[in-house]
Image (tube, rainbow, N blue to C red):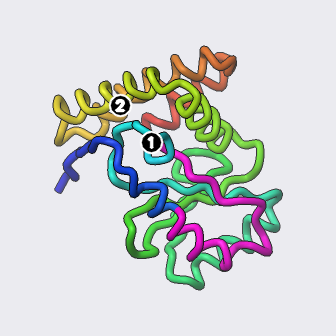
Amino acid sequence: MTPVVQVWPYDADWPLHFQTLKERIWPVVAEHALSIEHVGSTSVPGLAAKDIIDLDVVVLGAEKLQACIQALCAQGYSYEGERGIAGRHAFVGGGAPRHHLYVCLLGTLGLRNHLAVRDFLRLHPLRAKSYGELKMALAKEHPFAPAKYGAGKTAYLVELLKELGFDEATLDEVTRSNAE
């Protein structure tokens, strides 16, 4: 069954949910990781989003990455590999609150993309508002077509990343990886 695409108005509890998750995950990865970043739409005040918290655990190097993978799997997460985005390793499980957990190598495109979009939208609330309106419209138009919803978001995000100075090859990679 195809999941229903649902986008919600900003919820002031999302940063609290992130903090709860960070407090649970950080002790597991602290000796291997540089930080845990709240990314994705729930990390931007005022931005409409799916009610799923996105977290990036940032690591430096393959050895630290492997140690984090092992530590998280020992805590009940299931490792799903890169899922088409080099340097961004996905995990499922972990219980509530609902979240997407990634371990990202410092400097990789997946992490740079997440941080650039988050930081820009945090500094530009009117752009965050317009992005949220787009997401709400896409969810209403394509509630049973996550790929169409994602394609509409990707077009917006690629334009934003272009404004931020990402080169054409990188923009092509973002478009390709979001299509998978």
Query: Could you say which is closer to the camera, residue 89 or residue 112?
Result: 112
Under mark 2, the amino acid is Gly
Percent of width and height locating residue 110? 62, 42
Residue 130 lies in quadrant: top left
Q: How far apart are marks 1 and 2 (CA)?
A: 9 Å
Q: Give the range drawn in magenta.
A: 19-41
Q: Which image quarter is the N terminus in?
A: bottom left
Magenta-drawn stretch contains 27: yes
Mark 1–mark 2 CB contact (< 8 Å): yes
Magenta-drawn stretch contains 147: no
Q: How crowded is mark 2: few (under 14 residues within 10 Å), some or many (20 or more)?
A: many
Q: Which image quarter is the C terminus in?
A: top left
Percent of width and height locating residue 81? 57, 60
Percent of width and height locating residue 37? 63, 53
- The residue furthest bottom is 74
Q: Which mark identifies residue 164?
A: none
Q: For the residue labelled by badge 1, is the local secondary structure a helix, a strand or a loop?
A: helix
Which residue corresponds to mark 1? 41
Residue shown at 35%/43% (left/top)?
A: 10
